[in-house]
Image (cartoon, grey):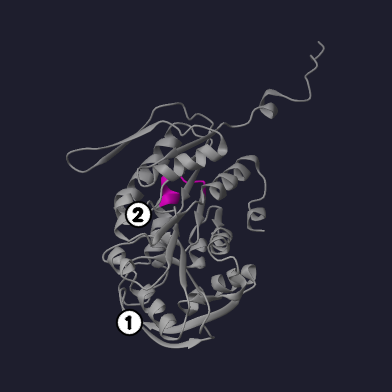
Amino acid sequence: MSVPHRAPSTVLESRRSPLLVFAGQSNRPLAQAICDNLGIRLGDSKTEKFTNDNLIVHYEESLREGDIFIVQTFSNPVSDSIMELMLMIDAAKSASAGRVTAVIPYYSYARSDKKDSPRISIAGRLVADLLQEAGADRILTMTLHSPQVHGFFKVPVDHLSADLVLTQHFKSCVPDAHNGVVLAPDAGSIKRASQIARRLDSGLAMIDKERLSDTEVRPRALIGDVEGRTVFIVDDEISTAGSLVETVNIARTLGAKDVYVAVTHGVYSGPAIQRIAGLDVTQVASCNTVLVSQEKIAAANGKLAVLDVAPLFANAISNIHTGASVSTLFT
């Protein structure tokens, strides 16, 4: 019996898993913006909370063999955001998804990356374990507080940087930005500050300080010169803005002309907005990895700006889906 001839491209070879993007409740505007950049619709899902505070997730379309990306940032309430993401991952795997990528624009537990006091959990690693146990095949995130958190995962991690976005923002604010100085608020920020200074072709300075507690720091010295120059302060995040106040005050005391601030994650918790509103600074910008409410923007006396990183995430998702390189996005 003769075997019938098959075309070189079989059904399996010609099929590509459909790209589907869903969102938790923490930052749906960013997820929608990512989908707008991809030219696809945001997937249909629904999260409900029972009277006993338990969550339940429903997908309202087929996920079978799909390449699923779930966008969920770890913002307030953080524990609910993490639990919702794990439920969404688990539900997607149960629905026969081909691959599930957790898109976590802000991984808040990256700050808990080491055992720096007795009898504590390294929560950054624990949350990584939980996400993998839930079924995440891949992680896509941005500007981890500590790069070593990348190593907590046993699945592939794509770690995006907002440096290009921050650099372009500074250039748009100050046409002669190359005459300014990029100021790192501490030693941990010097690498990022140095990269942005190279992109701006500007000066570089750093504040040497020690952290006394989660909310209190003590500056010791400024390395570099800011007198009479525009200062660009860069960091990974702003939480209560206590460190930011110290950094701005030091720059002003030492003769800085104008001060611009840009960070990746604008958490703005506790007294942050009130502190920024009264701060001697031209502008404080953060990316939309964390949703900043209109109420916070209004309360900051016009000093807050939000930068869009949706195109970066959209390009990364597209490259992951097609098997292209993600590292090309950093050039």
Q: Nearer the viewer, residue 259 or 73?
A: 259
Residue 132 included in the magenta stretch of the image: yes
Residue 75 tag number: 2
Image location (x, y in percent) of residue 75: 35, 54
| Above or below, 68 relative to 193 | above
Crowd class of label 1 (few under 14; some 14 to 19; many from 20; radius 10 Å): few
**Residue 267 located left or right of residue 54:** right
Where is residue 151? Give x, y as percent.
Answer: 52, 63
Residue at figure coordinates x 48%, y 48% from the top left: 103
2 or 1: tag closer to the N-terminus:
2
Which residue is denoted by mark 1 in the rendering? Answer: 212
What are the residue bounds of the magenta stretch? 131-138
The kind of residue on which mark 2 rests is Ser
Question: Which quadrant holds the N terminus?
Answer: top right
Percent x, y of residue 140: 52, 51
Q: Residue furthest bottom?
A: 221
Determine crowd level at label 2: few under 14, some 14-19, many 20+ residues with C-alpha closer than 10 A: many
Q: Amino acid at mark 1?
A: Leu
Image vertical order of residue 15 relative to residue 188, above or below? above
Secondary-structure class at tag 1: loop
Q: Is residue 107 visible?
A: no
Q: Is residue 141 left or right of residue 55?
A: right
- At x 56% / y 47%, what residue is drawn? 311
